[in-house]
Image: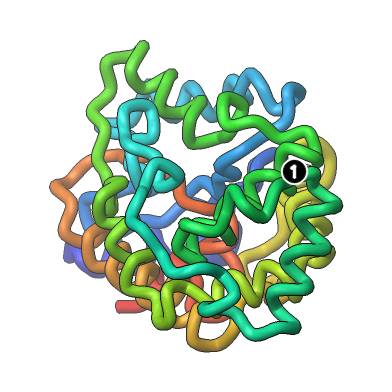
């Protein structure tokens, strides 16, 4: 009887889903209520403070769940392990493309020589976000973590900084594909960032099946999106009964094999 009631309630909620001013969706599992928030890890000044209704949901939650607690975690930018010169790791065309972008960003290529390729990609992406006016302190997950600490809410990590670093370190060829995708989709990624910012400031957020521009190769998308969504799906299903606010990168909520769709499956 209880299972039947849960199925009926879930069906009604799917037919008439609640709409929010921010990118989010509600998922009901037996005994568990998840409010999935599409986070942006760096934000603009006018994305602060968070919507009062979101803070109210956090106050009522048993815990805040994030990819990693970035308020006290080591940054991947501090990773330091000697690398061969870039000329030995990149083909001439990619190296030339990287040099042009460094000139545009006023970066010295010499600063990047000893870094892993995945770390160079992350540094370039951070530089791009900063040029668009984004800052880590205004990121959605950072603000939620600060609010959770202030409210005394429990914080649960889906991965943690060390596991995220391990994922990056296992990328094939030192993360060459991540750097190549960053360079190839540079302008597309900038537009995508601006689109996601608008979900928090202006436009209504899209539905989970909305198609977004692809900025990852098939291999990277499998490792950084699909596999992680599958792991998170299992972790969230194993939670103790209760209410949870779950903040993950906004791209995990949309497109093929997105996290909400995985959680809705039996």
Q: In x, y percent, where is residue 113?
A: 54, 58
Relative depth, front residue between 248 and 127? 127
Relative depth, front residue between 111 and 97? 111
Q: In x, y percent, where is residue 13?
A: 50, 58
Placement of the C terminus among the 4 image quadrants = bottom left
Q: In x, y percent, where is residue 86?
A: 56, 70
| Residue depicted at 62% across the width and 52% down the height | 110
Q: Is residue 27 above or below residue 65?
A: below
From the viewer's perspective, tell me whether residue 25 is left or right of residue 209: left
| Residue carrying label 1 | 197
Q: In x, y percent, where is residue 198?
A: 80, 44
From the viewer's perspective, tell me whether residue 134 is left or right of residue 233: right
Mark 1: secondary structure = helix
| Residue depicted at 44% across the width and 69% down the height | 84
Q: Does residue 260 appear in this view?
A: no
Q: Does residue 243 appear in this view?
A: yes
How packed mark 1 is, by other alpha carbons closer than 10 Å (few <14, some 14-19, many 20 or more), is many
Query: How many numbered markers are drawn?
Result: 1
Placement of the N terminus among the 4 image quadrants = bottom left
| Residue depicted at 36% across the width and 69% down the height | 228
Relative depth, front residue between 183 and 210? 183
| Residue depicted at 60% across the width and 67% down the height | 254
């Amino acid at each position: 009887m209880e299972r039947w009631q849960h199925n009926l309630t879930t069906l009604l909620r799917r037919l008439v889903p609640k709409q929010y001013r921010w990118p989010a969706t509600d998922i009901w599992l037996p005994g568990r209520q998840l409010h999935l928030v599409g986070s942006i890890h760096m934000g603009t000044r006018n994305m602060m403070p968070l919507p009062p209704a979101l803070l109210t949901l956090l106050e009522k939650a048993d815990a805040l769940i994030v990819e990693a607690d970035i308020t006290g975690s080591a940054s991947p930018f501090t990773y330091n392990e000697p690398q061969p010169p870039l000329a030995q790791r990149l083909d001439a065309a990619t190296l030339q493309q990287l040099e042009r972008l460094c000139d545009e960003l006023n970066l010295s290529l010499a600063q990047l020589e000893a870094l892993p390729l995945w770390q160079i990609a992350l540094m370039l992406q951070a530089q791009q976000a900063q040029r668009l006016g984004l800052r880590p302190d205004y990121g959605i997950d950072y603000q939620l973590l600060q609010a959770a600490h202030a409210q005394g809410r429990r914080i649960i990590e889906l991965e943690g900084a060390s596991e995220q670093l391990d994922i990056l370190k296992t990328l094939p060829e030192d993360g060459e594909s991540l750097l190549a995708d960053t360079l190839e989709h540079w302008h597309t990624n900038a537009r995508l960032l601006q689109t996601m910012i608008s979900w928090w400031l202006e436009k209504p957020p899209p539905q989970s099946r909305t198609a977004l521009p692809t900025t990852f190769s098939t291999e990277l998308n499998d490792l950084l999106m699909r596999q992680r969504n599958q792991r998170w799906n299992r972790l969230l299903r194993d939670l103790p009964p209760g209410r949870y606010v779950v903040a993950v990168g906004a791209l995990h909520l949309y497109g093929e094999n997105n996290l909400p769709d995985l959680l809705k499956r039996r």
